[in-house]
C-alpha cells in the first residue's frame, strides 16, 4: 500500500486525522492547513482515502469536509436539496419513513439515496430535473472509470448551472419584451443584453450570470414585476451582491470551467467543489420547483353559427406530477393563445418562453417533446439551439417562406411548407424581441432562399 | 493498442465495436432522429441487412452512457417471460424473476420504475428478431405482449420501445397495430448493402489504424467492385446481403493469411480476390466446409460420423420456414432421440467454435449465427425430418392452448402423428394429450356405434309401424271399396226413386195447379156474390142507421161476408162506420 508519492488517510475523527506516510502512522489536527503543510513537507501531491485519490491542490475549505467524510457522488447535492424541500409532501413522507438508524446518514445508503434522487428529479421544472437525472445517473454508475465519471460529472454540473441560468434569463427577457412593448421608455440598452441577442457563440457561464444580474437591475430600476413571484424568488440581493453565497458558488463553477483540461485533468476534489457549488446555486434557484413547463403542441379553431368561437388546445406537461393523467390534455376555451408556445407556469403566472425555449417536435408536427434552448445567433441567417435530450446543437435557419396562397400538390409538401413556416416564425419572433429590446431594426436573411424555392418545386 | 480483426463474421456489432462499424452513418442518424419523435419505433428490413448491428452499435453509440439503458430482449422460449426476466434483472434486486407456467408480467409499472431508478437512465426496450413472436409464439403470447406494451407506453418514466423485425413479417403486425395505433407511425427500413456502402466499409477499415486487415490502396476500386460482383453473382440487383459480405471478407482474410485465429496482419489484393474466384453461394459453401470438418472431428472421438448426421444435428436449430430457432442442449438431445447425447453436446461445441452457432445470453440457449444459415440447413432436410417438424409443430400448437380451450387431435391428425412419435421426445403433457385424444376418439367411435345401433332399432321400429299402418290402410281400402260399391248401388237406386218421385211430384203439382185454379174460380165467384150481397146489406143497414136504428142482424151477415174477404179494408171500414152510427 505504501508509496512515496502518496499519503493515505487511515482514520478521520472530529479533531484529528490519522495518516500513513511511508508505512508510518502520523496524526495531525483536523485542519486543511495542517494537511497541506504536511503534504508540502513530504513533497507529495496525492492523498488517498478509501481508494479515492485526491490532488491536494484541489482540496479547499469548501470541499475539505466532503473529502474527509468519504461521501459518495451526489450525497451532498441530494441531502441539501431534500432538506430544503422538507415541507413538500413527498419529501416529508420520505423523511418520515426512514428507519431510525438511517435518519442521520441516509445519503450514504444506496436505496434511500436513490429514492431521494427520484423525488428531487420530479420536484424541479423539467429541464433542471432532466439535468439532475443525468448527474444522478453519472454518480450512481458503478461500471464507469473514475476519470470518466469525474469528467462527466463536472461537465454536467456546468451544464445544469448553464441551463438554470438560461432558463431564468429567458423568463426575464420574455417578460421584458412584453413590458417594453407596453412601455418604450424602459431602458434596455445594456451590453449583456446585446451579447445575448447578437453573439455568434454560446455565452460563457459568467456572461450568463452577468446577463441575469443585468436583467434584475433593469427590473428593479424600472419597478417591473418579476416573472417569478417575489416570495418564490426570495432575496434579490443574494443574486446581485458579489460576496453572496450564491455568487461565490457561481464563481467556483465558472473558475472550474476555465480549467485548461488539455493541461490538467479534473480531480475528485474538484468534483466535490462542483457538487457543493451546484448545490448552493440550486438552493437559491429553488423556485424552479414551483413551476411547470407546458408545451402547446397544436391549437385548433372552432366557430359555429350563433355561438362563440372556441379554441382547442393540445398541451403537454413535461413534469411528472400528482395529477398523472394530465401529462397530455386537450383544453377547450374561448381565449386565443400564442401558437407553439412553451409556457413556464404555475397557478398564478404563465410566461411564454418562445422563441428562446422551443418544443422542436411541436413545431415539426412530431410526437413527444424535444426541448431546444437558445444558444446564440448563427450569422445573420438563423439561430443556434441546444437540444436538451440529445445534447447536440441544432441550427434553425431562416428560409423566408412566403405565407401567401400557394398551390399544394401533396400532403408531404404541405407538411414541409408548414414546418418551414413555423421555423421561420421562431426566427422572426426572435428578431422582434431583439429589435424591441435593443431598439434595432435588424432583419434575418435567408441564406438559401433560391435553393429552397427549387427544393419546394421538386416536392 | 493491439491490432484487431475488424469483421464480426455472422455476429452483430455491439456498442464496443464502434471503431470499426462503417457504412451506416445515414441510417444511424435517421434512427437517432426518429427515436426522439416517438415512444415506439419499428426497424425493418430483409434478413441480413444489419438491423441488430444498427441498433446495438450504431444507435447505442449516438447516446451518452447516462442517457441510454438498453434492454435487449429476444423471445427465447416465451417473449413475456423474457421481458419479465429482463425487467427483473435490471431492477436492482427490487424484483426477482420467477418462471411461470402461463407467463404474465405482474406489476409491470413498478418494475419499469425500479429499472429506471436503478440507474436514472432513459430505458430502451429493444425487441430483436421480433418476428419470432409470430413464427414461434402462440395467440396467448401475442395477446399478452400487446397488453404489456400498452401498459409500458403509459408509464411515467422515460421508456421507449424499438421493435426489430424482418420485413416479410410486417403483415403479422396487423393485430398489434389495432391495439397500438402509433405502432407503424415511425418506422425505418434498413436497406441491404449497396456498392457505395461497401466502398465506405472498405475505406473505413483502411483508415482504421488498429485494423489487422488492409486493402491495397491503389487497387481499392477494383477490389470493391470485384467483391460486390462476386457476391451479387448473376442477380440483377444493386444490393448484396451483409452476412455474405462478412463471410466473403473472412474468406479473403483466410486466403491471405491461413490464420484462423485472426491475429496475423493481412493485405488484401486483387490477386487474392482472383484466387478465390466466383464464390457463388458463399454461405452454403462455408456451411458445407464446416460440416465436413465437424464430421471429421467428431469421427475421431465417436467413430464414423458422416456429414448427414451433422446436418441432422443442425436441423433443430431452424424452423420449418428456414428461420433460426433458439434451442437448449437438453431440448436438442430430446429432439434427436436416435443420436447419443454426448455426441450432440460435442457437436454443439464444435458448431460454436466454427461460428455456425452462438450461445444466446442468459438462457443457456444456442442458436444459428444468422438466418441465412438456416435456409441452407433447411434445404438439407429429408422428407421424414420435415414431417417430424410438422408433427412437432402440430403437437406444440395444440398443447400450448390452455386446457379449457384446447381441442383434441382429430383421427386424421393422429394418423399423421403416430408413425413419428418415437422419432423425437415428446413431453408428458403432450403424450397425455395424444392419449386423451385417442381415448376421446375411441369413446366417440363407441358412441357412434351405439348411436348407430339405436338408430337401427329405431328404424326397425319405424318400419314395423309403417308396415302395420300399411296393412291397416289396405284393409281400410278394401272396406272402403266395398262401401263404395254399395253406396254406388244405393245411389243408383236412390236416383231411380228420385226419378219416380219427380214424376209423382210433377203429377201432384199439375193436380194442385188444377185444384188451385178451380178453387180460385170458386173464390172469385164467391167474392163476386159476397160483394154484391155486402153492397145490398150496406144499403139496408144505412137505411136503418139513418132512422137511428141498429141493424144488428145485417151486421152479423156483413161480418160473415167479411170473413170470406178478410183482407178487404173497405168492408172493414164500412162495417165499423155502421157500428159507429148505431146508438
Image: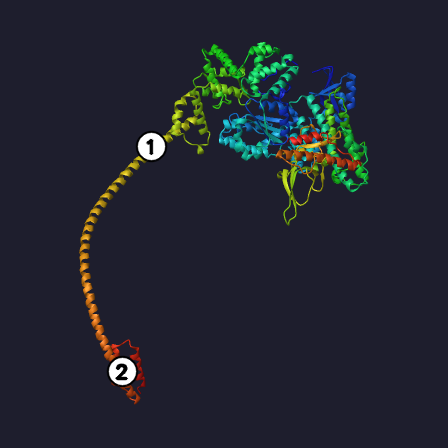
Q: Quadrant of residue B34?
A: top right
Residue identified by numbered label 2: B535
Marks 2 and 1, how far apart at CA: 115 Å
> Is there CB contact under 8 Å for labels 2 and 1?
no
Q: Provide residue B247's location: percent of width, then percent of height.
A: 56, 16
Q: Quadrant of residue A100?
A: top right
Label 2 neighbourhood size at 10 Å, few (<14), some (14-19), many (20+)?
A: some
Residue assigned mark 1: B446
Crowding near pointer 1: few (<14 within 10 Å), some, many (20+)? few
With A220 as the anchor, is B467 left or right in this view? left
Per the image, label 2 sits on a secondary structure element best described as helix
Secondary structure at numbered mark 1: helix
Count of numbered circles in the view: 2
The disc label shown at residue B213, or none: none
Q: Quadrant of the N terminus of chain A?
A: top right
Residue B26's spot in the image, x, y percent?
63, 24
User: What residue appears at the point 63 percent right and 47 percent down from the top-left corner?
Assistant: A304
Q: Is residue B218 above or below residue B40?
A: above
Closer to us: B372 or B344? B372
Task: Locate residue B433, reporting x and y percent.
Answer: 41, 28
Residue A101 visible in this rendered orientation of the protein: no
| Relative side of B123 to A248, left or right | left
Amino acid at each position: 500500500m505504501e508509496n512515496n508519492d502518496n499519503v493515505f488517510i487511515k482514520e478521520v475523527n472530529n479533531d484529528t486525522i490519522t495518516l500513513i506516510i511511508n508505512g508510518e502512522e502520523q496524526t495531525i489536527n483536523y485542519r486543511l492547513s495542517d494537511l497541506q503543510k504536511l503534504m508540502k513537507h513530504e513533497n507529495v501531491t496525492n492523498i488517498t482515502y478509501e481508494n479515492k485519490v485526491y490532488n491536494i491542490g484541489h482540496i479547499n475549505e469548501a470541499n475539505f469536509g466532503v473529502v474527509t467524510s468519504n461521501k459518495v457522488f451526489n450525497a451532498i447535492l441530494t441531502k441539501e436539496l431534500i432538506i430544503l424541500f422538507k415541507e413538500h409532501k413527498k419529501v416529508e413522507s420520505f423523511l418520515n419513513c426512514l428507519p431510525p438508524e438511517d435518519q442521520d446518514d441516509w445519503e450514504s445508503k444506496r436505496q434511500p439515496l436513490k429514492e431521494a434522487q427520484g423525488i428531487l428529479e420530479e420536484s424541479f421544472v423539467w429541464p433542471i430535473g432532466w439535468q439532475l437525472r443525468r448527474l444522478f445517473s453519472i454518480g450512481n454508475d458503478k461500471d464507469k472509470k473514475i476519470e470518466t465519471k469525474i469528467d462527466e460529472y463536472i461537465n454536467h454540473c456546468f451544464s445544469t448551472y448553464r441551463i438554470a441560468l438560461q432558463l431564468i434569463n429567458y423568463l426575464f427577457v420574455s417578460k421584458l419584451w412584453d413590458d417594453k412593448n407596453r412601455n418604450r421608455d424602459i431602458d434596455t440598452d445594456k451590453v449583456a443584453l446585446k451579447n445575448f441577442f447578437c453573439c455568434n457563440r454560446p455565452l460563457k457561464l459568467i456572461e450568463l450570470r452577468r446577463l441575469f444580474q443585468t436583467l434584475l437591475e433593469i427590473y428593479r430600476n424600472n419597478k417591473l414585476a418579476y416573472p417569478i413571484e417575489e416570495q418564490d424568488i426570495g432575496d434579490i440581493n443574494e443574486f446581485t451582491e458579489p460576496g453572496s453565497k450564491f455568487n461565490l458558488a457561481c464563481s467556483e463553477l465558472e473558475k472550474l470551467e476555465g480549467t485548461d483540461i488539455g493541461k490538467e485533468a479534473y480531480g475528485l476534489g474538484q468534483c466535490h467543489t462542483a457538487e457543493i457549488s451546484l448545490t448552493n446555486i440550486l438552493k437559491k434557484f429553488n423556485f424552479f420547483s414551483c413551476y411547470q413547463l407546458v408545451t402547446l403542441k397544436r391549437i385548433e379553431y372552432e366557430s359555429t353559427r350563433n355561438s362563440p368561437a372556441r379554441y382547442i388546445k393540445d398541451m403537454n406537461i413535461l413534469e411528472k406530477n400528482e395529477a398523472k393523467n394530465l401529462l397530455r390534455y386537450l383544453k377547450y376555451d374561448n381565449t386565443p393563445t400564442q401558437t407553439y408556445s412553451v409556457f413556464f407556469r404555475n397557478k398564478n403566472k404563465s410566461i411564454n418562453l418562445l422563441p428562446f425555449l422551443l418544443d422542436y417536435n411541436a413545431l415539426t408536427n412530431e410526437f413527444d417533446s424535444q426541448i431546444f434552448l437558445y444558444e446564440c445567433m448563427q450569422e445573420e441567417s438563423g439561430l443556434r439551439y441546444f437540444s436538451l435530450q440529445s445534447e447536440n446543437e441544432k441550427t434553425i435557419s431562416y428560409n423566408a417562406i412566403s405565407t401567401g396562397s400557394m398551390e399544394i400538390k401533396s400532403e408531404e409538401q404541405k407538411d414541409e411548407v408548414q414546418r418551414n413556416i413555423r421555423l421561420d416564425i421562431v426566427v422572426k419572433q426572435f428578431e422582434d424581441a431583439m429589435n424591441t429590446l435593443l431598439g434595432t431594426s435588424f432583419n434575418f436573411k435567408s441564406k438559401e432562399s433560391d435553393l429552397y424555392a427549387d427544393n419546394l418545386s421538386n416536392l | 493498442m493491439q491490432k484487431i480483426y475488424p469483421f464480426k463474421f455472422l455476429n452483430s456489432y455491439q456498442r464496443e465495436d464502434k471503431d470499426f462499424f462503417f457504412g451506416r452513418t445515414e441510417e444511424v442518424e435517421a434512427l437517432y432522429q426518429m427515436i426522439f419523435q416517438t415512444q415506439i419505433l419499428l426497424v425493418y428490413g430483409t434478413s441480413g441487412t444489419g438491423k441488430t448491428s444498427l441498433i446495438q452499435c450504431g444507435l447505442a453509440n449516438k447516446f451518452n452512457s447516462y442517457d441510454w439503458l438498453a434492454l435487449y430482449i429476444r423471445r427465447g422460449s416465451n417473449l413475456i417471460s423474457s421481458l419479465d426476466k429482463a425487467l427483473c434483472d435490471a431492477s436492482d434486486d427490487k424484483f426477482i424473476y420467477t418462471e411461470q407456467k402461463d407467463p404474465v408480467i405482474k406489476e409491470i409499472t413498478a418494475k419499469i420504475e425500479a429499472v429506471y431508478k436503478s440507474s436514472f437512465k432513459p430505458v430502451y426496450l429493444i425487441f430483436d428478431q421480433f418476428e419470432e413472436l409470430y413464427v414461434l409464439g402462440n395467440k396467448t403470447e401475442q395477446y399478452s405482449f400487446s397488453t404489456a406494451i400498452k401498459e409500458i407506453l403509459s408509464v411515467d418514466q422515460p421508456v421507449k420501445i424499438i421493435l426489430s423485425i424482418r420485413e416479410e413479417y410486417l403483415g403479422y403486425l396487423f393485430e398489434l397495430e389495432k391495439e397500438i395505433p402509433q405502432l407503424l407511425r415511425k418506422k425505418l427500413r434498413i436497406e441491404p448493402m449497396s456498392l457505395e456502402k461497401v466502398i465506405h466499409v472498405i475505406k473505413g477499415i483502411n483508415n482504421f489504424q488498429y485494423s489487422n486487415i488492409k486493402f491495397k490502396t491503389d487497387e481499392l476500386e477494383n477490389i470493391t467492385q470485384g467483391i460486390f460482383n462476386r457476391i451479387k453473382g448473376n442477380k440483377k440487383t444493386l444490393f448484396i446481403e451483409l452476412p455474405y459480405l462478412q463471410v466473403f471478407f473472412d474468406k479473403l482474410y483466410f486466403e491471405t493469411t491461413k490464420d484462423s485465429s485472426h491475429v496475423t496482419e493481412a493485405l488484401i489484393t486483387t490477386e487474392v480476390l482472383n484466387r478465390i474466384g466466383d464464390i457463388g453461394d458463399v454461405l452454403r459453401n462455408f456451411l458445407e466446409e464446416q460440416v465436413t470438418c465437424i464430421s471429421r472431428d467428431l469421427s475421431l472421438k465417436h467413430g464414423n460420423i458422416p456429414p448427414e448426421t451433422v446436418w441432422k444435428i443442425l436441423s433443430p436449430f431452424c424452423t420449418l420456414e428456414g428461420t433460426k430457432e433458439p434451442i437448449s442442449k437438453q431440448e436438442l438431445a430430446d429432439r434427436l432421440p436416435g443420436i447419443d447425447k454426448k455426441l450432440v453436446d460435442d457437436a454443439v461445441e464444435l458448431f460454436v467454435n466454427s461460428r455456425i452457432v452462438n450461445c444466446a445470453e442468459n438462457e443457456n440457449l444456442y442458436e444459428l449465427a444468422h438466418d441465412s444459415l438456416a435456409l441452407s440447413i433447411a434445404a438439407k432436410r429429408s422428407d421424414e425430418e420435415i414431417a417430424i417438424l410438422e408433427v412437432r409443430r402440430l403437437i406444440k400448437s395444440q398443447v400450448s392452448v390452455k386446457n379449457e380451450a384446447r381441442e383434441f387431435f382429430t383421427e386424421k391428425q393422429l394418423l399423421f402423428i403416430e408413425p413419428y412419435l418415437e422419432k423425437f421426445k415428446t413431453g408428458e403433457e403432450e403424450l397425455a394429450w395424444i392419449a386423451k385424444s385417442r381415448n376421446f376418439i375411441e369413446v366417440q367411435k363407441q358412441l357412434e356405434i351405439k348411436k348407430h345401433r339405436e338408430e337401427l332399432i329405431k328404424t326397425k321400429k319405424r318400419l314395423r309401424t309403417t308396415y302395420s299402418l300399411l296393412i291397416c290402410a289396405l284393409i281400410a281400402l278394401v272396406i272402403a271399396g266395398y262401401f263404395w260399391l254399395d253406396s254406388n248401388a244405393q245411389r243408383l237406386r236412390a236416383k231411380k226413386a228420385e226419378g219416380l218421385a219427380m214424376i209423382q211430384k210433377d203429377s201432384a203439382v199439375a193436380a194442385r195447379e188444377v185444384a188451385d185454379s178451380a178453387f180460385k174460380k170458386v173464390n172469385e165467384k164467391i167474392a163476386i156474390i159476397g160483394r154484391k150481397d155486402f153492397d145490398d146489406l150496406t144499403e139496408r143497414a144505412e137505411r136503418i142507421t139513418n132512422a137511428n136504428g141498429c141493424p144488428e142482424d145485417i151486421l152479423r151477415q156483413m161480418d160473415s161476408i167479411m170473413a170470406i174477404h178478410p183482407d178487404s179494408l173497405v168492408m172493414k171500414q164500412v162495417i165499423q162506420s155502421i157500428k159507429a152510427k148505431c146508438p
